[in-house]
Every structure is written in C-alpha cells, then in structure tokens.
Amino acid sequence: MVLGQIAGDAKSNEIPAVRDLLKAFTDQAGAVITVDALHTQSDTAQAITSRHADYVMTGKANMPTLYKQLKKLP
C-alpha cells in the first residue's frame, strides 16, 4: 500500500526526497518501512529508526562491507 509520495527536486535525486517524505508522517512507531536498494543508506536508516519504526532494505554487492555482513547471516 502506498501511503504517500512527493515529487523530487529536478536537480537532486530521490535519496533526500524519501527522507522528506518520512517527515510527512508524524506517527511511524511500530511501522515497517520498505525501500529499494537506492535508499540503503545509513542516514535513511537512522531517519527511520529515530521515528521508532523498522525498515526492510535491499543489500547489493555495490556496498561490499554491508553485503559481506549480510551474506554471513542465516
């Protein structure tokens, strides 16, 4: 279910736009936010957890340290 969307700035990309979108929802406690691999950023994760929500993010090989850590998980 899509709960909201915003247009990104033409001179930017969608990474800061998703953080702006998160600010639009005042009560995210207990929510699970899903984002695609582009948003697998520590700042985005911090923005979500600071609102007492959890996240599901995609880890890809272009982030080798994170990818190796994820591959070790069961």
Image (cartoon, helix red, strand yellow):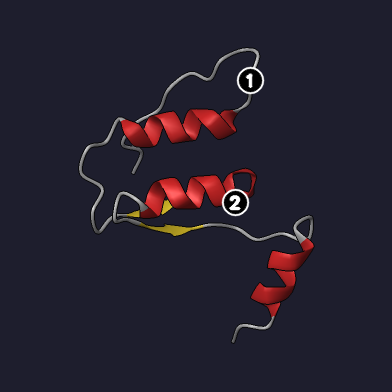
- Where does the N terminus fall, quadrant-wise? top left
Would residue 27 be visible to someone looking at this image? yes
Labels 2 & 1 near each other (Cβ < 8 A) = no
Specify the label residue 12 is tagged with: 1
Earlier in the chain: of badge 2 and badge 1, it is 1
Q: Position of residue 40 (x, y in %)?
A: 59, 51
Q: Is residue 20 left or right of residue 63?
A: left
Rendered view: 7 above or below 17: above
Q: Position of residue 7 (x, y in %)?
A: 48, 18
Measuring 43% from the left and 57% from the top, which residue is drawn there? 55
Q: Is residue 13 left or right of residue 18?
A: right
Rendered view: 44 above or below 7: below
Amino acid at dot 2: Thr
Amino acid at dot 1: Ser
Q: Residue beneath label 2, please?
A: 40
Closer to the camera in the image, 51 or 1: 51
- Where does the C terminus fall, quadrant-wise? bottom right
Please tell me in which quadrant of the rendered image residue 20 appears: top left
Alpha-carbon distance for marks 2 and 1?
A: 17 Å
Measuring 63% from the left and 50% from the top, which residue is drawn there? 37
Circle 2 SS class: loop
